[in-house]
Amino acid sequence: MKSRRILGLFGFTLVSAFVAVFLYAKFFQSEQQIVEVPVQPVARQIGLPALENRFTMDFTAAAESSVNAVVHVKTTAFRQMEVNPLYEFFFGITPESQSRPVMGFGSGVIISEDGYIVTNNHVIEGSDEVQVTMNDRREFKAELIGVDPTTDLALLKIDEKGLPTIKYGDSDNLQMGEWVLAVGNPYNLTSTVTAGIVSAKARNINILRNSFSIESFIQTDAAVNPGNSGGALVNTLGQLVGINTAIASRTGNYTGYSFAIPVSIVQKVVGDLMEFGEVQRAILGVTITNVTSELAKEEGLDDTRGVYVTDLSENGAAKDAGIKPGDVITSINGIRVNTVSELQEQVSKYRPKDKVKVVLKRNGNMKQFDVVLRNMQGSTDIVRTNEIIEVLGARFEPLNTNDKQKLGIANGVRVTDLKPGKFMKVGIKKGFVVTSVNKKPVDSVKDISDILRGVDGGVIIEGVYNDGSKSYYAFGM
């Protein structure tokens, strides 16, 4: 009887426990779940703003800080119209009365508060007048300080103080994928800003035909069109990292890629033009080519890194330092070079007499050479254009051994650029190689200057063009 009572009590307790669990699950557990759900909105409030800030780019500060320092450049060149001789005879029309102005447009960047402006050489080349219009519509007549056809840069000067400027940035540290802005005047639409990214660096597109030209362009997909030439390429801090120069196009308009001269080259060229009136071009004295898989296999090279030396200039800096044909240059002053463009860009930063450390690979071994750079005349002197060369109206470059062999000559200097002067007047064209002046052989600009110094009378110029045809020209000094 007692045990039955105990079992009944145990059963009642067990049933009560099940009932309690059932009631708790039904009426209280669901409320607990409702309390836990609001955790998710807290996560959204933390996460969304971070993602938004990370991917939203704001270029307004960079645009505002640069647009006022980019100017519109208008050029005027007066060209003579061809006149029928009979019409001129009967009506007295002279060539002077038949000149007509040819207009050109581009952009420029103010780099100093006292009016120095950098632009492209091709913007102002051949012009007789240059006018600059500021973003606030003020107009100024510009003076041409100097040009450098080998980099397609020119320096102008206007007479004004307190001008807005763009600070130089660092094009060496510019990264592929980095945002940049192109600021200029496409189609005469003044103060235009477009955005893109850096698509590539050290790009050679073969638009400068001078054999000593330096092409190491920054490639971007920022929209650039006719009129943008000479304008600014700036980073997101509003710093100048390049001068917009060219586009890759089959139509003449922007179709995807544009190219800018790195500011590392711009600074050097502008500094030389301001100080000396012309660029102090330092050369290593080598003929080089990119290392391809085919070349590496032919020459037994370990890999395709570096720049291959095919030839050396006589009495050049590289030859005197001990560099030989077949060497593979891998760095200049600690900066790696894997293409001809990269090597040219690095050397272009220096002046004659500067010493650079050249690291190269020879027969599988790494070697270092200290090379004292020289000018195109083979010396370490600062070059200043003298009055005689100014009268001729020409710029020259030396020839390497391969050039002389191809033309079948022992000496000579090539005409790289012309402006109004004796050479242009008698019909000498770019590319002409001067081999002798007044029957005396020439192999440098100094030779020409020395021969013509003190000459008062006739001058005979002999030489050859790239196709092998020989020509003779005569004029009076």
Image (cartoon, rainbow, N blue to C red):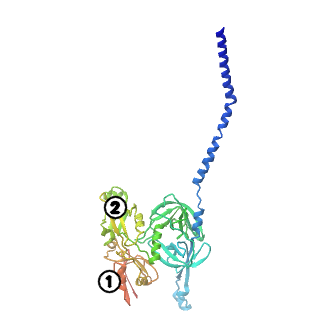
* Tag 1: amino acid: Lys
Note whether 286 is above or below 100 in the view shown.
Answer: above
Residue 446 in percent (x, y) is at 36, 80
Q: Marks 2 and 1: in contact by CB < 8 Å? A: no
Nearest the eye: 44 or 473? 44
Residue 328 in percent (x, y) is at 34, 61
Nearest the eye: 53 or 313? 53
Element type where label 2 sits in the image: strand
Nearest the eye: 121 or 236? 236
Q: Is residue 270 visible?
A: yes
- Please report the residue visible at 61 percent of the width from the left and 44 percent of the height from the top: 43
* Tag 2: amino acid: Leu
Element type where label 1 sits in the image: strand
| Residue pointed to by mark 2 | 360
Point out the image quarter for the N terminus: top right
Q: Residues within 10 Å of mark 2 (few under 14, many from 20)?
A: many
**In screen coordinates, is 368 left or right of 246?**
left
Note whether 400 is above or below 9 in the view shown.
Answer: below
| Residue pointed to by mark 1 | 440
Q: Is residue 262 visible?
A: no
**In screen coordinates, is 44 left or right of 262?**
right
Residue 59 in percent (x, y) is at 58, 61
- Residue 303 placement: quadrant: bottom left
